[in-house]
Image: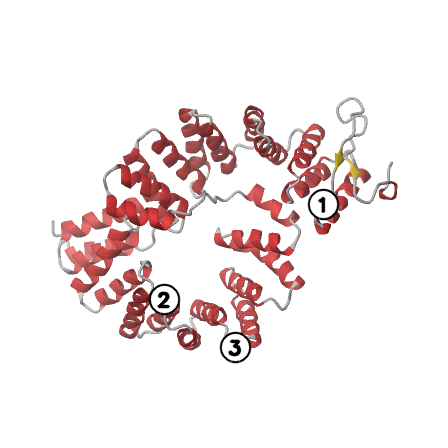
Amino acid sequence: MWRTRHLPAVVFLWLIIAGCSGAQAPVSDIQLDGVAPEVAAAVRTAQTAVVEDARSAAKWLTLGMVCEANGLFADAGRGYEHATSLDDRNPRAWYRLAIARARGGRSEDALATLDRAIALDGSYAPAHWRRGLWLLDSAKDDDARAAFEKATTTDPSNPGGWVGLARVALHKREDAKAVEVLERYLAQHPGDRYALRLLGTAYQRLGRPDEADYALAVGSAGEPVWPDPWSDQLAEFRVGFAQALKSATAQVLNGQFDAAVPALEKLQRERPEDVSLMHQLGLTYVAVGRASDGVALLEQALNRDPDNLESHLRLASAYINMNDYTRALSHAERAVALSPELGRAHVAVGMALWRGGRALEALSAFERAVRYDPVALEPHLWMGSILLEAGRAGEAMSRFSYAAGRNPTLADAFIGIGLVHVQRREWDDADAALQRAERLGPDNPRIAPARARLEAARGGQP
């Protein structure tokens, strides 16, 4: 068996030993000239493992993933082919091979390969929505719709199927259907700019210009970013600080905090002085329930730069999460002092005051927040809630209605509108608003209490 000392420094041979597919196959090179040193080192390490056990499908799969993760796509495809030839029962290997073939322009082969992965494991929703996207690109709308529907039933929480259904509806000019799907989806995923972009297109076609303008403005730069854990595994094989940080940040933005922690910890060990990395890891610790670790790291970042705005804002958020509103307010107010016209600094002050029982003071902070950040809608919802509790129903209604008008997918805005109607004893209007909220966000935990409040206030009246 060959050992690494027999191999050139830059080029390592792909090996297929006799018996893998019935006969000895020719070899081909992975060209590492001009590749970043850390990438070349990672590839060589994976190659060494293959040479030492060339019958291991897992090691060929790893070699393919190292290549794909670092931009060596053709070599990745060859690695996946070897992995599937050694073990044709691994759906993940077929899935990666399908993506490699699609990237290489082999559309029909990619679909057939993806079907093989689905046959082995039909419970993986991203395989279905990816299949739908490829079918949609081939103008096979009905087949694409079936694939997206399968994705939604396989995993209703994965956005790919829902947004895919909306894309099919838009392609077939079923604009009202697209709005229905997207509004329901956005109620659960309000920050998805790509979905807002699609929604704006649907609104525009339906002659709803005000709603279209808002959705298109917010979603103009949106691109689809949907959870795909099997592809997320590539992150552990990416080398180079910037690339690894990008991958970990994407996981954080997708709410995959548990998966992001190990990657961020590894990067933090590599660059222990990086303040921005301390910020990212600190808040991620808080998100996964490690609040004390998160605050300790954020305080360490602040000690290095006492006037760092982001350190104060992140500490304010962490302390709010820990119900320590005095410390949260201290950091939020320092952030305002450092940047008086930053809307989110005033939001931090408002949240600390509100959670700390100082609602009317919080109202003023939220008013300043929207003055400096007119696009932000959440402060209007919070102000509406404060005003409603203070018995100022008319002012509350104006806040909730403004938010609903700017973004008609906000279930919380319609919950607020419904509660204003409850306070005014306008039962039918309250019921209609809450029904709209239920359609937009059936899993919203604030709907049931609002509905109970309506029924209790109505007291059995029609």
Image coordinates of residue 256 in percent, x first then y, are: 51, 52
Image coordinates of residue 406 in percent, x first then y, are: 27, 52
Q: Which residue is mark 3?
A: 306
Q: Secondary structure at mark 2?
A: helix
Q: In the picture provided, is 26 more to the left or to the right than 434?
A: right
Q: CA distance from mark 1 to mark 3?
A: 42 Å
Name the one closer to the observer, 290 or 347.
Answer: 347
Crowding at label 2, few (<14), some or many (≥20) Cα neighbours within 10 Å? Answer: many
Q: Which of pointers 1 and 3 lies earlier in the amino acid sequence?
A: 1
Name the one closer to the observer, 328 or 267.
Answer: 267
Q: Which residue is mark 2?
A: 343
Residue 442 seen in the current view: no
Q: Secondary structure at mark 3?
A: loop
Crowding at label 3, few (<14), some or many (≥20) Cα neighbours within 10 Å? Answer: few
Q: Which of pointers 1 and 2 lies earlier in the amino acid sequence?
A: 1
Crowding at label 1, few (<14), some or many (≥20) Cα neighbours within 10 Å? Answer: few
* Disc 3 residue type (three-letter): Pro
Q: CA distance from mark 3 to mark 2?
A: 21 Å
Q: In the picture provided, is 332 more to the left or to the right than 251?
A: left
In which quadrant is the N terminus drawn? top right
* Disc 2 residue type (three-letter): Gly
> Which mark is nearer the camera, 1 or 2?
1
Q: CA distance from mark 1 to mark 2?
A: 46 Å
* Disc 1 residue type (three-letter): Gly
Tell me how the rendering is colored: secondary structure
Q: Is residue 205 above or below residue 367?
A: above
Residue 389 seen in the current view: yes
Name the one closer to the observer, 256 or 15.
Answer: 15
